[in-house]
Each structure stands twice: as C-alpha cells, then as structure tokens.
Image (tube, rainbow, N blue to C red):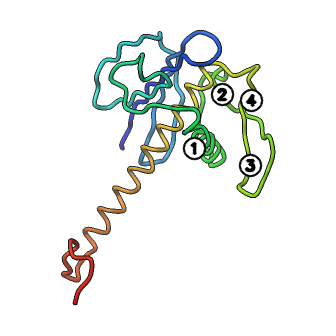
C-alpha cells in the first residue's frame, strides 16, 4: 500500500486560517479528509507528507501551491471526479465542500462551477486542496505504474532511446 499524508494550509478565504490533514491511498485511488490541526506557518519536513497551500509566500517548505485563477477548474474537477466515483470520505462534515460549490451554467465546454462566497471558508478550500493534491498523486502513481509495465513488457529488443529505425 502506498499512503501519502496531505497537509493543507489555507488562509486566503473567509474565517480563521485552517490546517486540514488528509490521507491518500494511491493504490486504491481513495482520499480521506481526516482532521483539523492547529494552523502554523512552520512545516516539519517529512518525506511521506505533501504540503499544499494557497499562501506559498507565508508557508515554508510547501510542495504544491494553489493559485485560484490558474487551478480552480482543475481543483473542482478533481473533487467531483473523486466524489462521484465514491472514492472520497470526509470525516468532519463541517469541512465537506459539497455545499459550497454551485453550478452556474452549462456551456459548450461543460459545467461551470463557482464557490458560494457567503458560505466558503478556509476549511472548505483546505479540503478541496487535499483532494487536488491527492488526485495528482494518484495520477502520478498510475503513470509510473504504466511506465514500469511498459518497460518490463518490452521484449522486442528495440532501443527506447531511438525514435525510429532506418
């Protein structure tokens, strides 16, 4: 089993800054949004933990930085894909982002979602960032596994560094 701890620290939204912890099982493709921890800008380095934040200038030693303008669409898609597949569990319902996301419209590119700004707080966004980081880890694991499988299945003797043969 490959478990990754995800430490999400968010302070750019409504309410008190929040630190939410999650666990991702990259083998099963599941994520658990586990608990709230005391917020601090100090990060203890740990090879098994990914730190994700919306304030990379404030948090030291982060691995994944969220920029709302660049990343919001991917974050929301990651959340709904995991939730709809039944692979997301939220222990503390106060952190569940389901109630803060509203479909604004459907256009030629698909559903357009937005945050309900009256209800969205740092805890909701921290939970969404756990899902986003977890989905990235799951995809990375799947790509690595596929690469490993392709490498071991290559019995034809071709040199993979050569793009074509003459």
- Which residue bears the numbered disc 4? 99
Disc 3 secondary structure class: strand
Foreground mark, 2 or 1, reads 1
Measuring from the top left, give residue 64's x and y in whole percent: 42, 33
Measuring from the top left, give residue 150's x and y in whole percent: 31, 69
Q: Are marks 2 and 4 in contact (CB under 8 Å)?
A: yes
Of the 4 image quadrants, the one containing the N terminus is top left
In the image, taking residue 18 as reference, residue 105 lies left or right, namely right
Residue 141 disc label: none
Could you tell which of marks 3 and 1 lies nearer the N-terminus?
A: 1
In the image, taking residue 54 as reference, residue 5 lies left or right, namely left
- At label 4, counting other C-alpha atoms closer than 10 Å, the crowd grade (few under 14, some 14-19, many 20 or more) is few
Q: Of residues 134 and 76, which is closer to you in this image?
A: 76
Residue 74 disc label: 1
| Residue furthest out toward the bottom | 166
Q: Is residue 50 above or below residue 58?
A: below
- Which residue bears the numbered disc 2? 96
- At label 1, counting other C-alpha atoms closer than 10 Å, the crowd grade (few under 14, some 14-19, many 20 or more) is few
Q: Of residues 1 and 21, which is closer to you in this image?
A: 21
Q: Is residue 159 above or below residue 12?
A: below
- At label 3, counting other C-alpha atoms closer than 10 Å, the crowd grade (few under 14, some 14-19, many 20 or more) is few
Foreground mark, 4 or 3, reads 3
**Quadrant hosting residue 142:** bottom left
- Which residue bears the numbered disc 3? 111
Of the 4 image quadrants, the one containing the C terminus is bottom left
């Amino acid at each position: 089993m490959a478990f990754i701890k995800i430490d999400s620290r968010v302070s750019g939204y409504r309410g008190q800054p929040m630190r939410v912890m999650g666990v991702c099982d990259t083998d099963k493709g599941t994520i658990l949004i586990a608990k709230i921890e005391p917020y601090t800008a100090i990060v203890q380095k740990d090879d098994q933990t990914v730190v994700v934040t919306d304030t990379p200038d404030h948090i030291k030693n982060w691995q994944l930085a969220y920029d709302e303008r660049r990343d919001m669409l991917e974050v929301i898609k990651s959340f709904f894909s995991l939730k709809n597949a039944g692979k997301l569990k939220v222990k503390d319902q106060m952190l569940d982002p389901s109630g803060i996301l509203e479909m604004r419209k459907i256009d030629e590119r698909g559903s357009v979602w937005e945050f309900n700004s009256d209800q969205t707080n740092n805890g909701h966004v921290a939970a969404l960032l756990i899902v986003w980081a977890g989905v990235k880890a799951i995809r990375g694991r799947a790509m690595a596994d596929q690469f490993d499988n392709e490498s071991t299945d290559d019995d034809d003797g071709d040199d993979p560094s050569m793009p074509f043969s003459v």
